[in-house]
Image: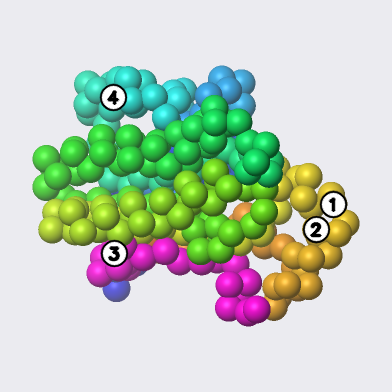
Amino acid sequence: MNNMFDLHGKTALVTGSGRGLGFSYAKGLANAGARVILNGQNEDTLSAAVAQLKSEGFQVLGKRFDVSSEAQVSKVFEEFDRDGIHVDILINNAGIQYRKPMVELELEAWKKVIDVNLNSVFIVSRQAAKRMIEKGTGGKIINIGSLTSEAARATVSPYTAAKGGVKMLTKAMAAEWAQYNIQANAIGPGYILTDMNAALIENKDFDDWVKASNPTQRWGHPDELIGTAVYLSSSASNYINGQIIYVDGGWLSVL
């Protein structure tokens, strides 16, 4: 029996994958057989991540570019074309956070969060989808949402707006690209033990709140997102489209 979750022969681009959850997604797909392309803007971090995966025997490349720059994204996909690299799987993971009350929030900070967390999903996906359509073999696009795709919290308004947009952009992708055998879905991570959440994890009041408000009474671990990423990247999810799967320990299910 064929393994529906086998990704051998596939190439996956994971944005923002030099560290954190992006690196976990990339390693998970590599473990499932995919060749992975790591992306980031810090050359040292990206090189170290590529070296680590290579040392473990995985097929991996590194591409340094700004996901919110249309010019840089276009250039890197032209390089893929020249080098005979076709992206079968795209995980739009790159993101930033900026915490400040709305009445004090600078417009430039708002725009930066929207650019990196939402506009980049459109920019990178458009380039990947064009080539998936031209090749005629379909593909997988996985956008990384958040609990804030569904619920808001104080001081993270641009992040909330961006991740709400990611949810609806995912549905728009399904509406337009399903006819080409492209499945576009999203993952909504809950409160996960990551570098981005370090300040929250170290805040005893917030840590206590996360544990008290979640049915599992704990934070999630990065590895607990890998199964969903592999599933949505594989043929096992060929009739799933336009959905967001929350991996949150049940947080959104309770009041």
The residue to which callout 3 is attached is 241
Q: Does the magenta stretch include residue 236?
A: yes
First-in-chain label (4 vs 2): 4
Q: Position of residue 45 (x, y in %)?
A: 61, 26
Residue situated in front as seen by the camera: 97 or 132: 97
**Residues at discs 1 and 2 in contact (Cβ within 8 Å):** yes
Which tag is nearer the camera, tag 4 or tag 2?
A: 2
- Label 1 to label 3: alpha-carbon separation: 38 Å
- Label 1 to label 4: alpha-carbon separation: 41 Å
Residue appearing at x 54%, y 31% in the figure: 107
- Label 2 to label 3: alpha-carbon separation: 34 Å
Which element type, helix, strand or loop, lies under badge 2?
A: helix
The residue to which callout 2 is attached is 206
**Residues at discs 2 and 3 in contact (Cβ within 8 Å):** no
Q: Position of residue 255 (x, y in %)?
A: 65, 78
Asked if residue 25 is positioned above or below residue 80 in the image, the reply reads below
